[in-house]
Image (cartoon, grey):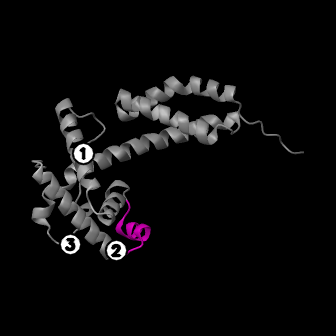
Amino acid sequence: MQRVIKLCTSAELSQFLSSVERRAYKHAVFSVRDDHAALDIVQDAMLKLAEKYGDKPAEELPMLFQRILQNTIRDHYRRQKVRSAWVTLFSGLQSKHDDEEFDPLDVLEDSENQTTPAAPEASLQQSQIIALIEQALSKLPARQREAFLLRYWEGLDTTETAAAMGCTEGSVKTHCSRAVHALSVSLKAKGVELP
């Protein structure tokens, strides 16, 4: 005898999301300590559940939703860490390391706890610096930009980046070194002196 699996209806999905909304929000607030980010995280998790798993059996929804929520929280932390890394990435790299084989990830340290919100002035300054970095990135040659983003935004190692770009690891290091140098020069020209 074969078991019949009853798939979730739109009404059941909506009822489930309504039932977990407040708890998920509190969970996210406790995790990220930022009301607005927590709301975004819960909304993203709900959308992912509805889009990708809305047709699953209703009894599977709680476990799926929790897994999606946890992954979305981890993604938030990863993005925050990368954004913080961008600001610290250029600090003194060129003056200490003019070697083309130098890899900034080898010396990058995340010594600050990024789970607590920054002061308004620091947050504004950081967002302005990130905007300047993004502008400078858009002016880089395509291969340098691709190598930089794969290594420092996506977090791939040199081998993975080389495979993704279809080039050697040495080429990846050269592209990254040139990108870091160009970004450092561009920021300095705009009066940004990073610590």
Measured in 3D between alpha carbons, the distance from the residue under mark 3 to the one under mark 2, in whole angstroms, is 12 Å
Residue 8 seen in render: yes
Magenta-tinted stretch: 156-169
Give the residue at mark 2: 169
Q: Which is nearer the N-term, disc 1 or disc 2?
A: 1
CA separation in Å, label 1 and label 3:
24 Å
Task: Residue under label 3, please give it.
Answer: 100
Number of disc labels: 3
Of helix, strand and loop, which one carries label 3?
loop
Left or right of 170, for residue 20? right
Q: Is residue 30 visible?
A: no
Position of residue 12 measured from the top left corner of the image (x, y, whole percent) = 68, 27
Q: Badge 2: few (under 14), some or many (20 or more) residues near its Cα, within 10 Å? A: some
Q: Which mark is residue 130?
A: 1
**Percent of width and height locating residue 140:** 26, 60
Q: Amino acid at mark 1?
A: Ile
Q: Secondary structure at mark 1?
A: helix
Q: Earlier in the sequence, mark 1 or mark 3?
A: 3
Q: Horizontal placement of 192 versus 85: left or right?
A: left
Q: Quadrant of residue 161?
A: bottom left
Q: Is residue 94 left or right of residue 48?
A: left
First in sequence: mark 3 or mark 2? 3
- Residue 112 appears left or right of 56: left
The amino acid type, in three-letter code, at marker 2 is Glu
Residue 90 position (above or below residue 171): above
Say whether residue 45 is magenta.
no
